[in-house]
Image: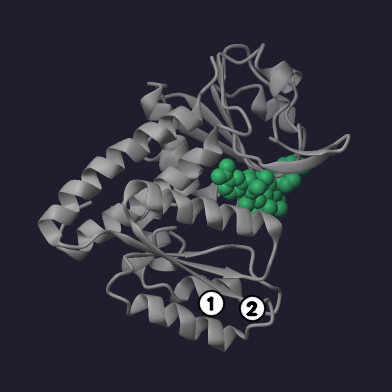
Amino acid sequence: MILDGKKISEQIKTEITEEVKIFSAKNNFVPGLGCILVGSIPASEYYVKSKVKSCGEVGFYSKLNKFDSTISENDLLFEIEKFNNDAKIHGILIQLPLPNHINEEKILQSVIPEKDVDGFNPINVGKLVLGQKTFVPCTALGILEILKRYKIETMGKHVVVVGRSNIVGRPIANLLSQKEYGNAIVTIVHSASKDIASFTKQADILIVAIGKPKFITANMVKNGSVVIDVGINRIQKGNESILIGDVDFENVKNVASAITPVPGGVGPLTIAMLLQNTLLAAKLSVGGNY
Ligand code: NDP
């Protein structure tokens, strides 16, 4: 079975559109997302544009502030502070990566926790680790949503997560190990792991987020397992530039019982979850609950 992230994301966007109508009728404002883009990396420009476009589709207000890659760290902090204080903005997105002269950690910490819809502020990361309600990073939340909507059982299952980044690997591994979200047995492997296949072959659910094209091959996957491919790698195929995942989709789909494609798997869910978190931030701003 192909796990169709595009279809689920469209469903979620329709649900959010309906919720926004009800929310704005009651509160006289719409949820707003403030986006910050530094420099002109084509992939980053593409992602930010998709996020802004999606905001329009569901009835959100959005504002995109673009800056030259030479902007100083202090000036960028000042710009974030403006969004922190802007009543029309409920969520702030800083498109990563940032130029080398800017301390990414410092920038992410400057987004106030109430508007941290990416879930990267240390206060929200701490809450997540402690199992408290907070903003969950969008890609991890998207993976949970795919598992939930396709009714894939996680309780007591062995989940193997390949990759331990703060953006994907760590949060999804943490959430799935928690009783409330996954109640699974979780193994994390990374670049220092020897014989990765010996771990991945044990996985009932295999989640891969490393950024290495077709790294996971069919002989590394257990028969009947569920494979979630987070990787987005742009490669040249003839004259064409195409996107492929970290999993050798064409061969692994014959071994797995269910698999996400790239593109059209986790990617669209990440954007849908950003919208969901922004709606949540707007609700919290008027006294709503998680
Ligand atoms: P990072 O580069 O931040 O982290 C990569 C992780 O993979 C690290 O933990 C690294 O290990 C590990 N790793 C790298 N090489 C290997 C290897 N050969 N064997 C085992 N582990 C390895 O990447 P991200 O987590 O940010 O992104 C991963 C991929 O997911 C990328 O392709 C990215 O584009 C994509 N992505 C997709 C999203 C979506 O919406 N679908 C959202 C975010 C990312 P170590 O810690 O030891 O260095």
As measured in the structure, the alpha-carbon distance from the residue carrying label 1 to the one carrying label 2 is: 8 Å
Circle 1 packing at 10 Å, graded few (<14), some (14-19), many (20+), is: few
Colour setting? one colour
- Quadrant of residue 162 within the rendered picture: top right
Residue that appears at 72% across and 19% down: 250
Most extreme residue toward the left is: 26
The answer to whether residue 166 is visible is no
Q: Which residue is mark 1?
A: 106
**Taking 153 as reference, is 52 above or below it?**
below
Horizontally, residue 15 falls left or right of residue 46, namely: left
Circle 2 packing at 10 Å, graded few (<14), some (14-19), many (20+), is: some
Tell me the kind of residue under disc 2. Answer: Ile
Q: Which residue is mark 2?
A: 102
Horizontally, residue 70 falls left or right of residue 182, namely: right
Most extreme residue toward the right is: 238
Tell me the kind of residue under disc 1. Answer: Lys
The answer to whether residue 229 is visible is yes
Horizontally, residue 5 falls left or right of residue 131, namely: right
Q: Where in the figure is residue 193, as x and y percent of width and height? A: 73, 41
Horizontally, residue 267 falls left or right of residue 255, namely: left
In front here: 276 or 226? 276
**Taking 34 as reference, is 25 above or below it?**
above
Q: Where in the figure is residue 280, as x and y percent of width and height? A: 27, 54
- Quadrant of residue 40 within the rendered picture: bottom right
Q: Contact (CB < 8 A) between labels 1 and 2?
A: yes
